[in-house]
Image: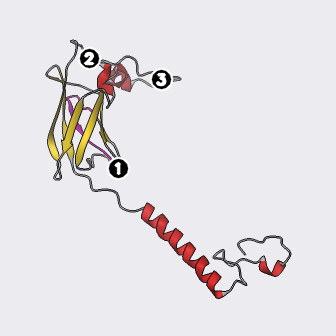
Amino acid sequence: MVGVSFCQQPEKALVSMTGCPVDSNRRQRLACRLTIALAVIAVGVGCGSKPEVVPVSGKVTYNGQPLPYGTVGFQPAQGQPSGAAIQPDGTFKLSTFAEFDGAKPGSYKVKVSCYASQSPSERAKPRTGEFSTGASLIPEKYAFVDRSELTAEVPADGTEAIVLELTGPEKKFPQ
C-alpha cells in the first residue's frame, strides 16, 4: 500500500501502487492514470536534450598583448551562459554543458576578469581559510556584461576567430 488515510469509510482509504483509490470507478481510475502518465512525460521533457552547441575559441588581448590568465564569460539574451579560462597565450575555448563543448550559435554580451589570485603562482599555493580574489588587474568595467561593451557573434558552424581586445593602463601581470 502506498498510503492510508483515516476517514469515515475505511474501505475507501486503500490506495493502489499508482496512488489511485482502489474502489474508485473506472472514470476516476482513468483520470488518475492519465495524470500520472502526463506527469512522467513532463518530467521526461524537462530532462530533454541540451541545445546544440558549436566549437568556439578565441583570444583575449590587453593593450595588444595576450592576456596571460583570467576568465571570459559569454552571456546570451536568453539561455545558458558559456565560459572559459584564459590560457597563458591569451587563448580560450568555451564550455557550456561540458568541457570545451562550445556555445550555442547567436549573439552574446561578453565579460572578462583578471585577478592576481588567478595567476599561476597564486593558483599553485594551498588554500587555507578565507579567499579573496584581490583587485582586478584590468579595468573593472570588463568584469560585467552590462558595462564591458564587449560583444561576440557565434556563427552556426562555430568559430576559432573571436578576438577580444581590451585596453587600459599599462600593467605587469604577476606570474
- Mark 2 and mark 3 in contact? Answer it, CB < 8 Å: no
Q: Secondary structure at mark 1?
A: loop
- Residue sticking out furthest to the bottom: 26
Query: As drawn, is 66 to the left or to the right of 78?
Result: left
Q: Residues within 10 Å of mark 1 (few under 14, many from 20)?
A: some
Which residue has dot 3 on it? 131
The reply to whether the C-beta atoms of the residues labelled 2 and 1 are less than 8 Å apart is no
Question: Residue at the spot x=47%, y=23% of the render?
Answer: 131
Instruction: List the residue tagged with mark 2.
Output: 173
The answer for how far apart the CA atoms under marks 2 and 1 are is 31 Å
Percent x, y for residue 51? Answer: 31, 56
Residue 140's spot in the image, x, y percent?
A: 32, 20
Q: Nearer the viewer, residue 144 or 134?
A: 144
Q: In the picture shown, does residue 15 fall above or below 73? A: below
The local crowd at label 2, few if under 14, some if 14 to 19, many if 20 or more residues have their Cα within 10 Å, is some
Residue situated in front as seen by the camera: 7 or 85: 7
| Mark 3, secondary structure of its residue | loop
Quarter of the rendering containing residue 132: top left
Disc 1/disc 3 C-alpha distance (Å): 27 Å
Are there few (<14), some (14-19), or many (20+) residues within 10 Å of tag 3?
few
**Type of the residue with mark 1:** Phe
Q: Which residue is mark 1?
A: 97
Eye-nearest disc, 2 or 1 = 1
Per the image, is 86 magenta? Answer: yes
Kind of element beneath mark 2: loop
Magenta span: chief secondary structure: loop
In the picture, measured across the screen, residue 123 lies left or right of residue 59, that is right
What whole-number distance in Å separates the C-alpha atoms at marks 2 and 3?
20 Å
Amino acid residing under circle 3: Phe
Q: Amino acid at mark 2?
A: Phe
